[in-house]
Amino acid sequence: VRRLLIGLALVGLCLLSVGSAAAGNGGIGPPSSATESGSSINTLYWMIIGITGAVFILVEGALILFLVRYRKRRHMPENEEGPQVHGNTRLELIWTVIPVLILIGIMAVTIIKVPSVNATPPAGSDPLVVDVVAHQFYWEYTYPNGVVQVDDLRLPVDRPVRLELRAADVIHSWWVPELTGKRDAIPGRTNTLDFEVRKTGTFTGQCAEFCGVQHAVMTTTVEVVPQAEFDAWLGQQEAAQADGTSDLGEQTWAGVCATCHGLDGEGDVGPAIAGNSTLSDKEGLARLLAEGQDNEGIDGYMPPISTGWPEKQLDALIAYLVGAGLAPEPADQGEAQDGEG
Amino acid sequence: VATRVEPVIPSWKDGTVMRWLTTVDHKKIGIMYIVASFLLFFAGGIMALLMRAQLAHAENGFITQDAFNTLFTMHGTVMLFLFMTPLFVGFGNYFVPLMIGARDMAFPRLNAASLWLFVIGAVIMLASFGAEGGAARAGWTSYPPLTEDAFSPGVGQDLWILGIHISGVSGVIGAINFIVTIHNMRAPGMSWTRVPLFVWAMEAFAILVIIAFSALAAAMTMLLLDRQAGTAFFLPDAGGNPVLYQHLFWFFGHPEVYILVLPAMGMLSEIIPVFARKPIFGYKAVAFSTIGIAFISLLVWAHHMFTVGMPDGLQTWFMIASYAVAVPTGVKVFNWVATMWRGRISFKTPMLFCIGFLVLFVMGGMSGIMVASYPVDYQVHDSYYVVAHFHYVLVGGSLFGLLAGTYYWFPKITGRMYNERLGKWHFWLMLVGFNLAFLPQHMLGLMGMPRRIYTYEQGGVFEAYNAISTAGSFLMGIGFLLFIFNMAKSWRSGPRVGNDPWVADTLEWYATSPPQEHNFDKVPYVTSPRPVRDLRLRLQRDQQ
């Protein structure tokens, strides 16, 4: 029976290692990183797993050796005692000092690697600074020229980027594993996260600090494109958002409202809102989104979610909802209604 | 014709129930602590299995997001506050007086108060499921501003605070009782270098409980005032600071890890020598490393906060302090392994769980080295890597140690032997199930799975790892069904044992099994850390 179980465990371990090899990250390591900062973290990871792995094998090897070598045999008298060894000061000093030296080594390498992990842009360089405000349950990105993106961040390749992270309500954490480590977005303070992406592509990430009911679906994508393409896109987006022809309304609906109310407004954790007249009542909708609501018990609860929105975002949202048939045509006199929002 | 002389009286009429409810006997209180904690453990375990069922495959709709968030909140809360902490208090209650040769705890009535406060705290916590809006659902760490009134309306969060407060008070008065007992009621001759190592561990446990739970009480009070009295300790708009809560919480939270690990280590230091038939290797090193770990554990708290944006100098300090804990911990591991060297090792269930501890806890320690290197923590913090890490420490370490202690002392508490065969099945199911459940979670964390998510979209290997993890957790569940069956059946009808079935070393084996109400008629003069072995050798010498 015991052999069977050990066999099962070994088979399980083999399956695990095969599976993780298939995952393409060497099985026990983090995914390869697209930034210098993330690569430095991976280097540290591999160094530590090498050292601790060796120590683990030594300790467990000694344990298994002793268990086999010094197991009680049948011919031994019942309750026979082993030699009454009470300790050995020199040995104990050795196995206190050696771990200290190993740990000092690991710490030294960590401290050496910190500057490259931090990736603070050198003086005189021209980092792209993006303002990131985390909300329940979306990311609002604002570029220096005022262009707003919801959940979808677009960045140029090979240029230092600085994210200035803030939070509008509760604590969140910005994490795109293939770029670099996470950084919390905390209400009342601004954190910065610096990195420089070295290859183009699309990277996904999600909020890492539990932030409420829909934390699990608070995702983000980062699309990295060549600088020229980025500049063209940013300029075009600026013009489109100024004249109301951008996709900002759709982004806002999909990233902000649909998380709780469903992509068709059919309801999920939040109630169904498709066709609700508040959606096209600018004044009422603005108030609802800014204040949230807390009606009779927890089911009537909605957090305030539009803190810090520029006016163009609300306009774009209403325009999109009316255009997509999710909201009725706005009435001439917007009567403020406190419908479900 | 046989006639019944005495009618059978139900136990609630003959006074048995009242005797238990009003007892101040440390052994009865200990048993009630142990039984209640295990009941709560099964509740917490079922919560874990429900969560694993939900995460078995991508985009599962087994339970709602609200239910999932409530489950992980209450799973953590129940396991840490209402299972492990009181279970150690229960074992400490039962065995500290016996091991130091005392007749009871120093303050028996305070002891009873501590038990019943814990029960009240547990009832409040569980009853909060029925509160308007449901139980708390902001994680066992309950970070504001999410737990502030504006984002967590409903009374669930308030009841959570109340339950933590009451069980915290229970812990602190219990800890005071332990310290007074250990300092004042040791048997004649039992100097500090002859105190059993489990008692050393309970001393460190008690000191840490007093320091850590006080910080927690401060954090809970401030949070409650924010919610109910309009203060703004953690509300940034009114000048408060949510990071302050994290400092207070982790000043409690990290020592709490050692509150839960040190007594398990103490159990190992008692059990390994008995089943290796040797004295512990380096008694003083093991005892002092206990105190060393307890002290350093008070200096490391902000390594839970590397991603909040602290200056590098501060992060470096907390990294160094965290690595410092590894040194005394390593000393313990090396000394346990050295204790087995040239021993006569028999693989009874308690010893198997000790060996499991030595494998799994060391793995947890290794991933601890990883997460304490703060740049690496930027990646793995709040991911499943960390979930795997602390389960290796708290399940692979503390729980395996606790189960070793449960099997080891079962014959002393009940006077009967458990079923060895079932015990071994339990061990192997636990070992295999545990590794299947938690080893893949390291990889999931590295692949980008944050903790506390009720769903995921990724298929492929990501989904497969989650499925393996779920299967492993259910294997552990089966193991625990065997455990319940074994304990319940053996308690009723296991073979009776004498005072000292393991031929052990410490004074609890000098008392009868189960011990009499006053524990000992006469306590022998203690001349070494192994008084019962000394006595045994003296008797053998006299016979010759």
Image: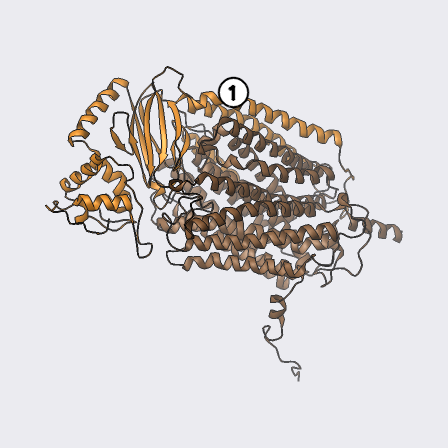
Chain colours: A orange, B brown
Foreground pick, B234 / A204 = B234
Residue B271 location, x and y as percent?
Answer: 68, 46
**Position of residue A213 in the picture relative to residue B19 (left or right):** left
Per the image, label 1 sits on a secondary structure element best described as helix
Which residue corresponds to the image point at 72% horizontal and 63% vertical from the top-left?
A: B516
- Is residue A76 visible in the rendered image? The answer is no
| Residue at the image point whose x is 65% and y is 80% from the top | B6
Up the image or down, B222 lies above or below B375; here it is below
Residue B358 picture location, percent across and down: 61, 39
* Rendered image quadrant of residue A311: top left
Q: Is residue B269 visible?
A: yes
Pointer 1: what residue? A112
Q: Which three-letter amino acid code belongs to the residue tagged 1? A: Ile
Q: Nearer the viewer, residue B378 or A204?
A: B378
Residue A258: image x %, image y %? 25, 43
Q: Position of residue A127 (x, y in %)?
A: 34, 20
